[in-house]
Image (cartoon, rainbow, N blue to C red):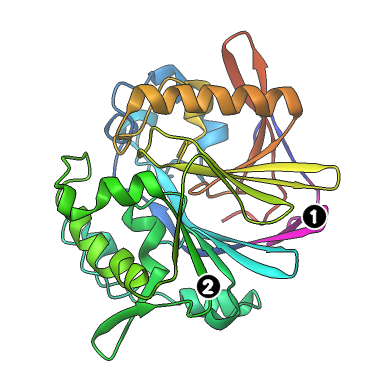
């Protein structure tokens, strides 16, 4: 991909090291989300897309022969594996296999090789110490569980699962919330959240939660009430894992644009602007949950505007 920005390193890989912490990217799938920019991001400014094709194609916008605003957005379903303080932390659990998702047919009854991809990264389900769900959407909790003898059981039997308290309250079907995700969220609760709660493996947190000396979860609401980010600080390095704070580089160009999946678009905008401002001031690497390509980026700020100035050194997908 030819852009005006640079890659973080010349040699790309599937692993990055920050201080004493090693980060690996494990991809479940990557491809079109099936929505054009104005469907995925209602009210988006076309100027954030048109004229930025070098930055968007082929990793964030399909090379489908369509004009920019008629093409479909491209995303990755992926997990970040952080090895920190002698423990293995799995950040976000993708879509999962065998899940019934009639409201999102492309996620329904999948049979991916995700566990094999974890194994290739040196991770077995039993070796995971902590599972972090940055929020409780279907594509972040799917591998919390797997189907075994007709029942949903925790995929990571020795892990503590960290879930935002606000999302546990919001998505509980007993609360009967009206959400932008529709009633399909109840299925997600039944097959990917409730079984882990029943197993006694869930720790609910609010505000902030320190995992260890290097890793801290922080509230970043807007996408969901409990949406969060993970801050990595080790040695001289500081990195932010942004969850679903954004889904496309176009949201760096147009920070006001929220996805159609944001419960509170106004709050999501404030969260994005706050994090981008900090990242520009401190030259932080940002790693969103769904960025394909090189996986992450750095930003610079001019007034109220931001732009990408460098890509992470992960192998492009």
Residue range (magenta): 9-24
Percent x, y for residue 104? 22, 56
The residue wearing badge 1 is 11
Of the numbered discs 2 and 1, the one sitting upstream in the chain is: 1
Task: Look at the picture and state if 91 lies above or below 118.
Answer: above
Q: Secondary structure at mark 1?
A: loop
Task: Look at the picture and state if 160 lies above or below 217.
Answer: below
The reply to whether callout 2 and callout 1 are in contact (CB within 8 Å) is: no
Percent x, y for residue 163? 43, 55
Q: Residue furthest bottom?
A: 149
If the image is split into quadrants, where does the N terminus sit?
A: top right
Q: Which residue occupies the foreground of this view, 229 or 315?
A: 229
Percent x, y for residue 216? 63, 47
If the image is split into quadrants, where does the C terminus sit?
A: bottom right
- Left or right of 253? Residue 140 is left
Q: Which residue occupies the foreground of this view, 17 or 308?
A: 17
Q: State the residue at coordinates (39%, 48%).
A: 165
Q: Secondary structure at mark 2?
A: loop
Q: Can the viewer see residue 262?
A: yes
What whole-number distance in Å separates the C-alpha atoms at marks 2 and 1? 33 Å
- Left or right of 136? Residue 100 is left
Q: Can the viewer see residue 96?
A: no
Q: State the residue at coordinates (40%, 72%).
A: 200
Task: Look at the picture and state if 41 lies above or below 96.
Answer: above
Label 1: few (<14), some (14–19) or many (≥20) C-alpha neighbours in 10 Å = few
The residue wearing badge 2 is 159
């Amino acid at each position: 991909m030819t852009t005006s920005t640079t890659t973080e390193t010349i040699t790309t890989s599937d692993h990055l090291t920050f201080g004493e912490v090693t980060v690996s990217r494990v991809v479940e799938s990557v491809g079109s989300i099936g929505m054009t920019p104005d469907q995925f991001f209602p009210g988006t400014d076309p100027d954030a897309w048109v004229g930025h094709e070098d930055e968007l194609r082929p990793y964030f916008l399909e090379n489908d022969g369509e004009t920019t605003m008629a093409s479909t957005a491209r995303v990755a379903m992926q997990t970040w594996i952080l090895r920190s303080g002698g423990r293995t932390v799995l950040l976000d659990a993708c879509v999962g296999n065998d899940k019934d998702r009639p409201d999102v047919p492309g996620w329904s009854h999948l049979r991916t090789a995700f566990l094999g991809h974890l194994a290739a990264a040196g991770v077995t389900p039993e070796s995971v110490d902590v599972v972090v769900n940055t929020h409780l959407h279907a594509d972040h909790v799917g591998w919390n569980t797997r189907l075994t003898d007709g029942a949903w059981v925790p995929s990571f039997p020795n892990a503590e699962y960290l879930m935002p308290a606000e999302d546990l309250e919001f998505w509980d079907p007993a609360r009967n919330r009206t959400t932008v995700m529709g009633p399909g969220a109840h299925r997600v609760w039944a097959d990917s959240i409730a079984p882990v709660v029943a197993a006694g493996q869930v720790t609910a947190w609010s505000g902030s939660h320190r995992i260890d000396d290097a890793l801290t979860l922080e509230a970043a609401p807007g996408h969901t009430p409990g949406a969060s980010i993970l801050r990595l600080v080790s040695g001289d390095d500081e990195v932010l894992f942004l969850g679903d704070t954004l889904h496309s580089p176009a949201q760096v160009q147009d920070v006001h644009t929220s996805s159609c999946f944001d419960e509170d678009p106004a709050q999501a905008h404030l969260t994005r602007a706050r994090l981008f401002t900090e990242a520009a001031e401190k030259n932080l690497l940002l790693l969103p949950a769904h960025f394909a390509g090189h996986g992450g980026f750095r930003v610079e700020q001019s007034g109220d505007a931001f732009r990408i100035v460098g890509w992470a050194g992960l192998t492009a997908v």
